[in-house]
């Protein structure tokens, strides 16, 4: 503790005794040992002083009229001051039960009357060592709190940046709609959903789940998102650009998974892997060509409300060199929709560790057959929260629902992205 002039601040002691002579004796000793002293003639007066002033040391007689030393000590500790005070009880009682009672109410030490000056100095020195350690701990805790607060601010900003990767949760393609959901289990997570245009009549939709949670997973998902950047055709891993002809062509979905697998194993140098569902959607024909790489089975909901889960699983991305992937086709008719989602949905557990599961997801989609777009995703999130019984999910939750309303004219597909 340092005062404004740069000199060590004087410690402050409170002396509580109904004997004025005793208070004067103790005050003389403590002032000689570098303490500023304050005196109180009763426990009631002392407690009033303690409500507005911090004392490093409290020296209190046990036997006093009205509120005795034991009662004062109990009431003093009940104030729960931010800084610790070393409390010494002065007593003529020597039985163990009395000592135990004093310790139980918050006393740190005892001195038997008549008090030896040398013993008093030794007990106070012991208390000073404890207070010095307490101050060092408090200082370290404050430093940790400052670090925590700074990290909290950074994570809040990182959460905003991660959610900014989904620039628009809703896209209107005229004859079709696409809606996106992303909710991290913590500040940031490893799930990623998105879309980009392949051609005038084709779009790609992807759902990715990076293994693990937190900052590492979020950083990898951010890097992965750059691989599917819209408008950066030369950098998009799913597109092939011919600089001589000025033409851009799309890689088959299975080749997209293979290229990502090679990239993660050869360049990213991480032990993390990811699962992927990637769909190449033709807005003019309703054909969806999909690769499933360790991701949950995509759900196709027909116009009648019936739900089909498609795909055969496949290997995750980033685990096995030269892993082989295959794609499959789904034909969407007007009124059908395709749902790509992470396992944070199907593996969401209730209070009895029961998973939400694929079957329950299918039934929920059937119940929400007449709910569309963002309303559907918000209803899904509400159902998951009700199932888990928690305000925060234990895993990242994400999904992309593509709703095919009608066949778009070939080469005449626009896109409108209103605010959700």
Image (cartoon, rainbow, N blue to C red):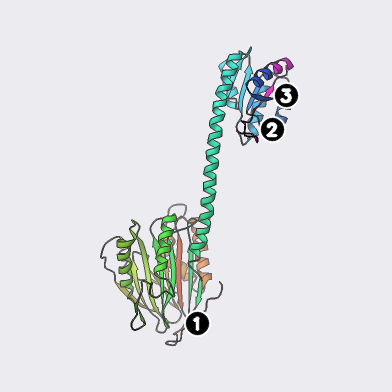
Q: Earlier in the sequence, mark 1 or mark 3?
A: 3
Q: Provide the residue designation for mark 2.
A: 53
Q: Is residue 70 above or below residue 51?
A: above
Q: Is residue 342 left or right of residue 84?
A: left
Q: Residue at x 42, y 67 (%)?
A: 225
Q: Residues under labels 3 and 2: Cα distance?
A: 13 Å
Residue 90 percent coordinates (x, y) = 63, 18
Q: Which of marks 2 and 1 is in front?
A: 2
| Helix, strand or loop for disc 3 | strand
Q: Earlier in the sequence, mark 3 or mark 2?
A: 3
> In front here: 376 or 49?
49
Q: Provide the residue designation for mark 3.
A: 40
The N terminus appears in which quarter of the rendering?
Answer: top right
Confirm whether residue 94 shows in the render: no
Q: Provide the residue designation for mark 1.
A: 174
Residue 122 percent coordinates (x, y) = 56, 18
Q: Is residue 213 above or below residue 409?
A: above
The region drawn magenta spans 1-24
For mark 2, does the 10 Å Cα neighbourhood hold few (<14), some (14 to 19), or many (20 or more) residues? few
Q: Is residue 323 above or below residue 329?
A: above
Q: Earlier in the sequence, mark 2 or mark 1?
A: 2
Q: Which residue is drawn at 49% across and 72% down?
A: 179
The count of marks equals 3
> In front here: 229 or 81?
229
Q: Residue at x 53, y 52 (%)?
A: 152
| Helix, strand or loop for disc 2 | loop
Quadrant of residue 276 within the rendered picture: bottom left
């Amino acid at each position: 503790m340092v005062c404004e002039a740069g000199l060590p601040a004087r410690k402050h002691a409170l002396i509580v005794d109904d004997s004025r002579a005793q208070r004067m004796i103790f005050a003389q000793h403590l002032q000689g040992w570098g303490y500023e002293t304050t005196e109180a003639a009763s426990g009631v007066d002392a407690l009033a002083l303690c409500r507005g002033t911090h004392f490093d040391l409290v020296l209190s007689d046990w036997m006093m009229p009205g509120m005795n030393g034991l009662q004062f000590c109990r009431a003093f500790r009940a104030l729960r001051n931010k800084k610790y005070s070393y409390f010494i009880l002065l007593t003529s009682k020597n039985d163990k039960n009395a000592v135990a009672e004093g310790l139980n109410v918050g006393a740190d030490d005892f001195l038997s009357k008549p008090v030896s000056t040398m013993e008093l100095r030794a007990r106070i020195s012991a208390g000073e060592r404890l207070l010095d350690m307490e101050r060092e701990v408090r200082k370290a805790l404050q430093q940790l709190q400052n670090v925590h607060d700074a990290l909290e601010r950074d994570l809040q900003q990182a959460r905003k940046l991660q959610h900014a990767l989904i620039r628009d949760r809703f896209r209107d393609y005229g004859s079709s709609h696409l809606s996106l959901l992303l909710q991290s289990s913590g500040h940031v997570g490893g799930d990623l959903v998105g879309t980009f245009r392949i051609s005038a009549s084709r779009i790609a939709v992807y759902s990715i789940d990076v293994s693990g949670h937190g900052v590492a997973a979020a950083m990898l998902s951010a890097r992965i998102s750059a691989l599917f950047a819209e408008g950066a055709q030369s950098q998009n891993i799913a597109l092939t650009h011919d600089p001589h002809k000025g033409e851009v062509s799309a890689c088959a979905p299975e080749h997209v998974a293979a290229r990502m697998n090679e990239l993660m194993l050869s360049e990213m140098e991480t032990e993390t892997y990811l699962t992927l569902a990637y769909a190449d959607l033709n807005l003019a024909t309703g054909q969806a060509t999909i690769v499933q790489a360790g991701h949950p089975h995509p759900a196709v909901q027909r116009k009648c409300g019936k739900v089909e889960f498609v795909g055969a699983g496949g290997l995750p991305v980033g685990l096995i060199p030269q892993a082989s992937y295959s794609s499959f086709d789904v034909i969407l008719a007007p009124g059908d929709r395709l749902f790509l989602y992470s396992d944070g949905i199907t593996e969401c557990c209730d209070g009895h560790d029961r998973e939400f599961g694929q079957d329950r997801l299918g039934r929920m989609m059937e119940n929400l057959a007449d709910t569309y777009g963002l309303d559907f995703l918000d209803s899904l999130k509400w159902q998951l929260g009700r199932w888990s019984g928690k305000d925060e999910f234990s895993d990242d939750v994400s999904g992309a629902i593509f709703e095919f309303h009608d066949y778009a004219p070939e080469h005449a597909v626009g896109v409108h992205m209103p605010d959700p």
